[in-house]
Image (tube, rainbow, N blue to C red):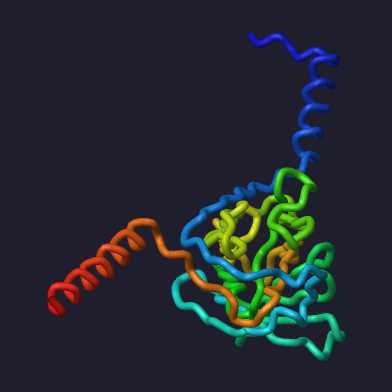
Amino acid sequence: MHKPMGKGILLVVLVLSLIVLSTPVQAAITINFNAGTTYETTALTGYSTYGNMMDGMKVTAYFVGGGSETVLWADDPMTGPGAGMAEGADWGLYENGDTFTSIWSLSTLVDISKLLIQAGPGNTVFDTMHMGDIEGTLGSARGWTFDYQGAASDINLNVTYFDQVALSGSSAVGDLYLNLEIVFVDGYSTGAAPFRFIQDTDNLLYSGDITPVPEPSMMVLLLSGLAGLAGFGWRFRK
């Protein structure tokens, strides 16, 4: 025969149960940095970037079950002078104000598995934190790495930055990237809590001033080819 549970033990069990039930599930967010292809630009604008200053960025939504849709970032005149958006058929990504402190928000009527934001076509780069609050790349000032601001605490995300950006003639510091990928591990739908986040961006000083830096091996091949052509020309003249 089992011995009846004492009142003290029963009270402890009850309290522990209430603590477990009342403790929110923590968000599972993994942030990755992938250097990928290194790009270079002459300089950054050095001032705050607002939602309406990123026109031309490519935003692609990938849907649960297959398929995707790519739209271009544009001004959002209905919201205000500092607002921008990428609006698809049944979804939209919006940002209003200085990206250093203002919130990006996703609205959708379909289940989304991934968002890919390609900032380069909008003369924009993602500026992440570098060594805490210290300025990274010259002219970028303080950055802000992806920071989830949604109401739900049980979201499961894989966030990846890739294709780093450096100033011309300098090595990449590791705080600027061209692309941001947000993977919803369990999918994201209109029935979920609002998906909001903070992500700082910077503008290129000159429009279209972004080019890939050749890999060292490619440079060796190129120089070898030029040397070969020069030698062939010398023999031909001789």
Q: Position of residue 141 (x, y in %)?
A: 78, 58
Viewport quadrant of the N terminus: top right
Q: Is 28 or 235 nearer to us in this picture?
A: 235
Drawn side of residue 100 relative to residue 39, left or right: right
Residue at image point 53% right, 60% down: 162
Q: Residue at x 70, y 75 (%)?
A: 205
Residue 147, quarter of picture: bottom right
Q: Nearer the viewer, residue 197 or 7?
A: 197
Q: Horizontal placement of 33 versus 143: left or right?
A: left
Rendering coords of residue 163 (x, y %): 52, 62
In percent of width and height, residue 78 lies at 83, 90
What residue do we see at 82% from left, 76% from top? 96
Whether residue 182 is visible to the viewer of this picture, yes or no, is no
Seen in the picture, residue 118 relative to 136 is either above or below; the reply is: below
Asked whether residue 99 is in view, the answer is yes
Q: Where in the figure is residue 135, as x and y percent of width and height?
A: 76, 52
What residue is drawn where x is 46% and y is 77%?
67
